[in-house]
Structures are given as structure tokens and as C-alpha cells.
Amino acid sequence: MLLSKSCVYGLRAALYLAMKDRNEFTPIKKLSDKLEISFHFLTKILQQLTADGMLESFKGPNGGVRLTKPGDKIALVDVVLAIDGPKLLTECALGLPGCGLKNPCPLHDQWAKTRDKIRDMLQRTTLEDLAEKGKAENLRLTEDGDFESLLRD
Amino acid sequence: MLLSKSCVYGLRAALYLAMKDRNEFTPIKKLSDKLEISFHFLTKILQQLTADGMLESFKGPNGGVRLTKPGDKIALVDVVLAIDGPKLLTECALGLPGCGLKNPCPLHDQWAKTRDKIRDMLQRTTLEDLAEKGKAENLRLTEDGDFESLLRD
DNA sequence: TTATTTTAAGACAAAAGACTCTCTAATTTA
DNA sequence: TAAATTAGAGAGTCTTTTGTCTTAAAATAA
């Protein structure tokens, strides 16, 4: 799999937050219900994003999490790096340590180019892009749902 | 990680075989020594490639495995599909089942394009390409080695 | 035939990833 | 003060991946 499950869950949650009013805190419980992700598991993942500075959290009633920046300032690559780390975008496709321009494996050149394509996509695509598209076309973030049902209270 | 370890080991082994005389059987023990992979583990992986028809095996003294086709007729994607299956090239980046043109997730379009880039690379690149390049530039398939030492008996 | 070399196959163990649950603490609201 | 909510740690489970080991089967050579 390209992205770990944790990363996928983090992306879905970030996307959900990008659809909402940015000033509003959303309780993790609500996120986990809407997105059908285990509450405790999602909590841990979002803690990573909070530690990273992409989210801020607020305790107590009316608390929750929210994005620290507008959705068009957060690229998918930010979420991926915060959760899965840089391995996807730096590691050798044949798993050789230290593979690079200096001491490459036979596949290095091809993979480096392909990897750049992946990075470009993740860098160019923002949460806002996907939230807008999702709203406009009523797309889904869960197995069965759609955006409208996500946004309904 | 893009490819599983099994798949990476399978690719390294296939690449090794592509460097050698195609009619000669190479014992898996030799492959595992040269490539520094656990013998029994590599055996299982190569059994998958044999079941797939990409390799043929021969028991007994002077036995081993060899490619069933010339290296320029085997693309990396063949090895990846035989070991990791089609998931990498078919699955949704957000992990949603049934994500496709008909019922896409918000990321579907971007990911489908990127995925095609990965597929193209894996389809265009053959074992022969990499074996030739590896020989010409004396590149490596292990942490410390180089092609020359791989080919030495 | 018998011993040796080699793949085939499957049981088993270890490690990592993906969760689940509990408990405590801190913060904020009402 | 009581309730809501995140923070954080940690134990425990389940599954998948990775790796080890043992035995069986096939081929060869002596």
C-alpha cells in the first residue's frame, strides 16, 4: 500500500475539517463517528497532526480540533509527511540503503522520476481542492456515505 | 512502502537471473548467498514466480531456477503483479472500496493519473534494461556489493 | 541402490501494523 | 462543582508480513 492506514485516516479527517468552518472546533468523537474510524485510534493519529502544528486542539465542552491554516495552504504531502514520514518520497524502490545519485541501484533513475511525480501530486493537491471538489460533486469519504451526509449534523 | 519486501527480493533475484546465461539453472542457495537474503524465504518468493510461469525450476544437482523468457520480455510490473498482486495499481489512495470512475473519492482523479505513471514506469522497464545498466555502470543489488562481485563465482 | 543435491511445501515463530480498551490528568464550560 | 473533552501513557489483541525450520519429493551421480 502506498499510504499506511493511519495516514489514510489522517487524510480523511483533515479533509473533513477542511470542509467545515475553519474557526469551529470539531470533537474527535464526531469525526470518528462520521468517518467510521475507531475513536481512540483516530485520537492518536490526530495527536500526531496536532504535534506537527497542522491542527490545534481545545479541551472541554465545545472543544475539539481544527486546522491551523486555511485548507488551500495545506497540501496532502503535509499530512503524509506528518504521519508516514518521508520514506515514501526518499527511499530506494529496491530497498537499498544509501541509494542515491552517488551510489544508485539499477532502478534508481526511473524510480526517482516516478517518485517525483508522486511528490508533485501530493504537493499540488490541497485539502481545499479536494473539499471543494467533494462538495461540488457530492463525493464520499467513507464506504457508503456522501459529502452531504457528512456535513449534516 | 511502495513494494513489499518479498517483492523487492523477487525483483533483485529476477534481476540477478537476467544478468546470467538464460539457459543455465542457478541454485536458490547461490542467489540467497549473493543477494544476502534468507534462503528459505527467497525459496518461497521464487516459488510464486515459478507458479506464475516467469521462472522454471529444476530439482537435483545442477538444478535451480531460470527465467522462462529473455530479460527484455519481462517487465518489472510482471514481477510486482506476481508477488504483490494488482492492489498498488488498482486501489484507492484513500482506501475506499469500489472507488473508481463511477463512485470516486475526491482524490480519485489525481491518484489515478499518478498511479498510471507508476504503472508506465514498471511496464516500460524490463529486467534486461536494468541488467544492462547495472553491468555497464557496475551498480549494486545489495547493501555493499556491486555487479562484478555478483557475477564472480 | 544409495547418498547427495536441490526444489516444494507447510508448520511455526517473531516482528510490525492496526487497532481496542482503560486509566489518569488537564482544561474548559455551565 | 460536575460534565465534556483532549492529552498521554500503556496494556492487550488481532492480523499481516517477515523469517526460520523441518520434512518430503525429485533428480543426479556414484
Image (cartoon, coloured by chain):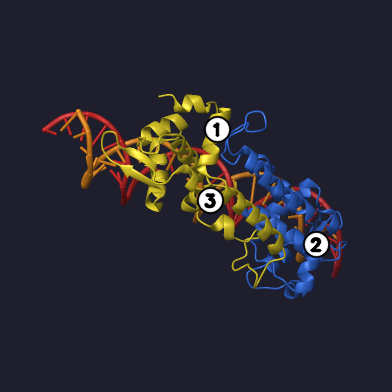
Chain colours: A yellow, B blue, C orange, D red
Label 1 chain ID: A
User: From the viewer's perspective, is residue A62 above or below residue D10?
Assistant: above
Which residue reaches farthest right? Answer: B23
Q: Are marks 1 and 2 in contact (CB under 8 Å)?
A: no
Residue in the foreground of this view, choosing between B20 and A37: A37
Question: Residue A34's spot in the image, x, y percent?
Answer: 44, 29
Quickly name the residue at label 3.
Answer: A77
As drawn, is D15 to the left or to the right of B116?
left
Quickly name the residue at label 1.
Answer: A134
Q: In terms of secondary structure, where does tag 2 sit? A: helix
* Crowd tier of the residue under label 3, counting other residues whose Cα lies within 10 Å: few below 14, some 14–19, many 20 or above: many
Q: In terms of secondary structure, where does tag 3 sit? A: helix
Q: What residue do we see at 50% from left, 55% from top?
A: A85
Q: In terms of secondary structure, where does tag 1 sit? A: helix
Question: Residue A21's spot in the image, x, y percent?
Answer: 40, 35
Q: Do the residues at pointers 1 and 2 share their chain?
A: no
User: From the viewer's perspective, is residue A151 above or below residue B83?
Assistant: above
What's the residue type where badge 3 is placed? Val
Q: What residue do we see at 53% from left, 26% from top?
A: A146
As drawn, is A44 to the left or to the right of B105?
left
**What mark, if any, has residue B129 been given in the picture?**
2
Q: Do the residues at pointers 3 and 2 share their chain?
A: no
